[in-house]
Amino acid sequence: MSKIEVRNIYKIFGPHPERWLDEARSGVSKDELLAKSGHTLGLRDISLSIEEGSIFVIMGLSGSGKSTLIRHFNRLIEPSAGQILVDGEDVMSLGKTALEQFRQRKMSMVFQRFGLFPHRTVIENAAYGLRVQGMGKAERRSRAQRWLEQVGLAGFENQYPHQLSGGMQQRVGLARALATDAEILLMDEAFSALDPLIRREMQDQLLQLQAQLNKTIVFITHDLDEALRLGNRIAILKDGELIQEGTPEDILLAPANDYVQSFLQDVNRGKVLNAAHACNTPSLTLTMRSRPPHALERMAASDFRYAAVLDGKRLAGILTREACQRALQAGARDVAAYVEDMASVPATAGLDEVLGRMLRSPEPLAVTGENDEFLGLLSRSKVVELVTPALEAAGGETDAAQVEDAAPVESPDGGESGDAKADASAA
Amino acid sequence: MFPEIIPPRALRAPIDDFVGNLVSQYSDLLRAMTQPLLDVLIWMDQITRHSPWWAVIIVIMALAWVASRRVLFTAAMGVMLCAIGVLGLWDAAMQTLSLMIVAVIISVAVGIPIGIMMASFKWLRTAMLPVLDVMQTMPSFVYLIPVVMLFNLGKIAAIIATIIYAVPPVIRLTDLGIRLVDSEVLEASRAFGANRFKQLFGVQLPLAMPNIMAGINQTTMMALAMVVIASMIGVRGLGYEVLQGINRLQVGRGVLAGLGIVIIAIIFDRITQEFGRRQRKGA
């Protein structure tokens, strides 16, 4: 069951949202509604399901409604219509006290501009959630202390927030949110106000903490790189509407429309996509005990110059046609002695790394999974296509030329996409 | 000439009648109701006037020390108080001081809650703003007349007039201070499940404190100014000395009493400002 589920959320800002709900349902655009009624359409028909223990990123530009949406989860903003379920419990049905309890125990939040209390010390800030819960001073301080150490702020307990740098202030915000042991962490553009280096550091720290804590994190950002780096799933919002929802790969490989596509222009795809994405399922594999005439026949039939040789599921090496020829002449019983070593990359290697390997050597590369399991051969054309998808559109001819120069083994038809033969480098 | 649509007499008469009625019918009741206030005023008057002069100076210097934590500042306050004594105005100054203290305490006690409510309810702010404008701009003599008619000459009339005049700044600045609290900080406290009470006392009021202190400072100054005017309705004190100077054409008496008022004003202005300054530093 999903941890957070929102169903058909609508939010209209203005004095009489209920009057215009039907209009919004019938699909009037944001601008039309504003012109007609003076009401702003904040969110239209948003339905999401967020899995427990995942990082769910909500991405959009300013005004897309992402900050509005995240505030619906703990009802800092009330929806005009729709349902919000957390652990199957309808948040909308909570009374005032129950809602306060819910906010104290279930969710905690990190804010873009930190939202720290300037009149409290760092440790008092970190202990705030516990203080609201009514925990005694000694205990809440010792817990807050532990979390401050976790985020690397030991020694700053008695400073005031304005004495710290932005990155450190946000660490206090993070410690404050983690200290309550809430299962759900809402992060509203938590790293957007930080400079790039610190942001990266904080992202790493968040991923590290998440690996230990396994919370359900809802992360808001306007930065697709950040979304792709952190998110298990990503939802893209525009003008209060959900444009696309899926895994980072889904978004990169199958953008729903031009809007999403336009975001992808500047993304470093090599970091998100990995060797597995550029791997072809092998159409021809041999085993160590294949007989040379048979192997040669099969290679000739598919017009391949070489083929991968497996030992069980593991990759044993590569057999070229010339080696096979020699085996035949020597009258060898099987090809085992003629198999050469083959370079391989793990399936999880980022494409930028793969690209580096590819450019350094013209040899074919195998992609291996866990325990050296052979998954397929790396397709050069696929790598090029994945890393620079908008090549034609962007007119990046120099890039294309360089890549093709550096891949001399590639067959002339290598530029075509999804070529099934490309896996074994057709002659 | 603007054409006469309603004769002014027709407008004035009902007001006169209303106040006249109020005086004849409710005067006794109102006086009985304000008796506790009068008791407090007399009690405060006795404390300030009957305490030894050095005790008063020590208390005020202690306040100055708490506010500023600066030796020089504290000493300067002590010296200024002594100057009042040297000028021969000690007793008059203590009478003024006692009235001022009560007026400020009541103004703050009334003003801060009203300011808080104004910040929370928009309709109340809309309703209160013109009322505050009237309180601040209406010449004080206009409401001194009915107040004196109701309560007779004396301390009660003076303190009511003083509060009407002095309470607006603390209301306005409390309202402003609370509304200026960073919305994200307040949102953070809501997100962690703080109830209205905890939001108010844990976040809004502490963060509004510098503004509220500025309001209290202004209220103190205005209360002092009004206490002087109140001498005209029979309250003894520094203002009365000034009034006598005018009546008898004794310039010296007027100037010295005026100096006494200035010294008290400076003392309380600086002390309340120091409180505000330390609040702002957040230390």
Image (spheres, coloured by chain):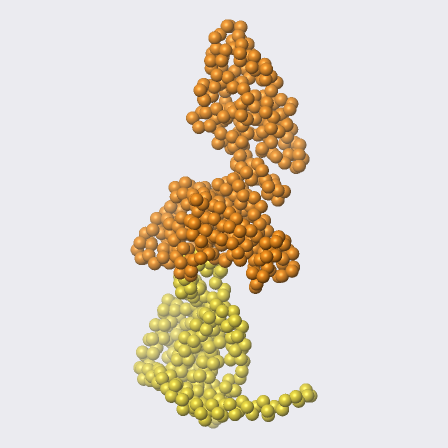
Chain colours: A orange, B yellow
Q: Residue at x 56, y 53 (%)?
A: A43
Is residue B15 visible to us here?
Answer: yes
Quadrant in the picture for the C terminus of chain B: bottom left
Camera sees residue A112: no
Q: Quadrant of residue A23?
A: bottom right
At x 66%, y 37%, the residue is A394
User: Number of labelled discs?
Assistant: 0
Q: Quadrant of residue B239?
A: bottom left
Residue B11: image location, x then y, percent: 58, 89
| Vertical arrangement, residue A372 with respect to residue A32, above or below | above
In the figure, A14 relative to A27: above or below?
A: below
Q: Position of residue B46 (x, y in %)?
A: 33, 84
Identify the residue shown where x is 52% and y is 43%.
A234
Q: Give percent across and percent down for residue A52.
A: 43, 44
- Residue at position x 48%, y 24% from top? A374
Depth check: give the residue in front, B174 or A134. Answer: A134
For the residue pair B248 and A269, the one nearer the viewer reads as A269
Q: Quadrant of the N terminus of chain B?
A: bottom right
Viewed as shown, does residue B123 lie left or right of B196? Answer: right
Q: Position of residue A256 (x, y in %)?
A: 59, 41
Vertically, is A330 above or below A12?
Answer: above
